[in-house]
Image (cartoon, grey):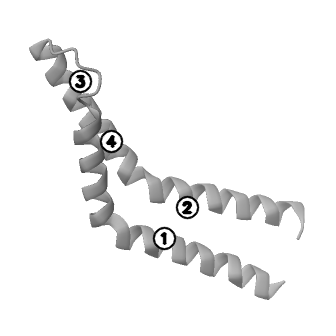
């Protein structure tokens, strides 16, 4: 493998990681901000209040987007294996 091919593989891997993890990160961000706003409005200063809703929201999101995540990872693996076979 030459240098540009290695960079292409690395760029594709990083892009796949971003695509696969972005739905979970966005949901975690939105739920965290929403809980923080509720805490600021009600002046409840409990530090552990944000963890349970965030974990539940991320888990439910993972159940919903798992087929998309698996498809993205499968297509990445197919691209890598075709590069290996092609030499």
Question: In terms of secondary structure, where does tag 1 sit?
Answer: helix
Mark 2 sits on what residue? 16
Q: Quadrant of residue 62?
A: bottom left
Question: In terms of secondary structure, where does tag 3 sit?
Answer: helix
Instruction: For marks 3 and 4, give the CA distance.
Output: 12 Å
Residue lying at 64% horizontally and 77% vertically, measured from the top left = 79
Q: Looking at the image, which is closer to me, 80 or 2?
A: 80
Front: mark 2 or 4? 4
Mark 3 sits on what residue? 36
The quadrant in which the N terminus is found is bottom right
Task: Decide which of tag 2 and tag 1 comes sooner along the chain.
Answer: 2
Q: Quadrant of residue 53?
A: top left
Residue lying at 45% horizontally and 73% vertically, measured from the top left = 70
Task: Decide which of tag 3 and tag 4 comes sooner along the chain.
Answer: 4
Residue lying at 15% horizontally and 15% vertically, measured from the top left = 44
Instruction: For marks 1 and 3, give the CA distance.
Output: 32 Å
Q: Residues within 10 Å of mark 2 (few under 14, many from 20)?
A: some
Residue 10: percent from left, percent from top: 71, 58
Mark 1 sits on what residue? 72
Residue 38: percent from left, percent from top: 14, 23
Instruction: For marks 2 and 1, give the CA distance.
Output: 7 Å
Marker disc for residue 28? 4
Q: Is residue 75 above or below residue 63?
A: below
């Amino acid at each position: 493998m030459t240098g540009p091919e290695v960079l292409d593989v690395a760029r594709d891997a990083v892009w796949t990681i971003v695509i696969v993890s972005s739905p979970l990160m966005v949901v975690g961000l939105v739920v965290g901000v929403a809980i923080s706003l509720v805490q600021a409005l009600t002046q409840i200063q409990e530090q552990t209040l944000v963890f349970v809703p965030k974990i539940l929201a991320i888990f439910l999101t993972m159940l919903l987007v798992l087929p998309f995540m698996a498809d993205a990872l499968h297509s990445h693996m197919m691209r890598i294996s075709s590069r290996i076979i092609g030499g």
